[in-house]
Amino acid sequence: MSSCSQTGNWEEVGPIWADTTSKICSQAWRHHRSGAAWKRWFWTPVKSTYIWHKATSTQRRKLVIAEVRQQKEAERCAKAVSQAKQGQWTRWENVEHRKLTWRDLWDMEEGRLSFIIRATYGVLPTPKNLNQWFGDDPTCPLCQTPATLKHILISCKRPLYLEAQPARRESNLLDTAQDWKMQVDLEQKLTFPPEIITTNLRPDLILWSTSQESLYILELTVPWEAAVGEYKCKRLKYSDIAAEAVQRGRRTQVLPVEVGCRGFVARSTTRLLKGMGVRGQALRQAVRSLSEAAEQSSNWLWLKRTPPGLQDDHQPARG
């Protein structure tokens, strides 16, 4: 008698999973003859891990399908790691996973969805990619340097005739004291309150509490996803005024708010929001808003990658 027949009828799982299912059943049966628990073999997303010999046929089927999916996902990731361009996302170690629901896909405009997917996998028709694919000119039409996606989204020194870029800025309130005050460098120039410090530097946001003698200096940065976490220059920029504020008796922290240029929010940013008391639905909404703001701004930059005079005759069929 085969090990599969001893563990239940697996024909209902379907022929797609037949070979993998057979191997998994054999492993599970050998494992449980020693009295061990099935949970060492499977993780299942249904908030509980069934013990194999106590599971019903429906539960066993869910366990097998979950394991097959996990194995297929591992194979997909292994393939992505071997791809120099499309697999670059596997090396983004400091960003949060980004989840797109069916409702998100349904509500998105076709152009925006196309941008998100192709930007994530690095296959947008940039001049550099077009040079690799078709031999086109790889230089940026605005500054005559190699036009990779990274260059277009965060490095290009584009001329001033372009209309104002949508601001990649978001803010959240600190909910740990009653006298927190906040200033944001948006419509009006931010100036440090004289009771804190005198400086010409303009961080994106400052929060301070007189009762707690605390000061937070927040600086928004929108890096290439592979560079998320490398924000030492931001800290060094404000190190002198932070040290002076400390000498004046204020507990001071310089905190970066990092959001990747393709909309992937840094884990440091979610930790910052949690530390400010932003939790649950409010946290999810804040992360979503940050992600969409960065991604939409990058999409705008992508659409404006060509000067108006060259828009009609530069790569018309591959945008």
Image (cartoon, rainbow, N blue to C red):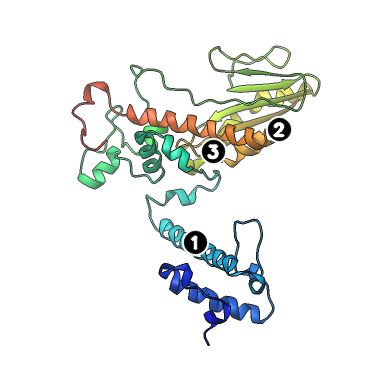
Badge number at residue 210: none
- Quadrant of the rendered image containing residue 274: top right
**Residue behind mark 2:** 277
Q: Earlier in the sequence, mark 2 or mark 1?
A: 1
Q: Quadrant of residue 214?
A: top right
Residue annotated with mark 3: 265
The x and y percentages for residue 315 are 21, 34
Q: Quadrant of residue 267?
A: top right
Q: Is residue 300 above or below residue 120?
A: above
Q: Which mark is residue 69?
A: 1
Judged by depth in the image, the label closer to the viewer, 2 or 1, is 1
Report the residue at 71% width, 32% height from top.
277
Q: Residue at x 29, y 43 (%)?
A: 129
Relative to 301, does residue 51 appear above or below in the rendering?
A: below
The relative height of residue 34 versus residue 319 in the rendered view (above or below) is: below
Q: Residue at x 53, y 31 (%)?
A: 290
Counting residues from the start of the chain, the first of labels 3 and 2 encountered is 3
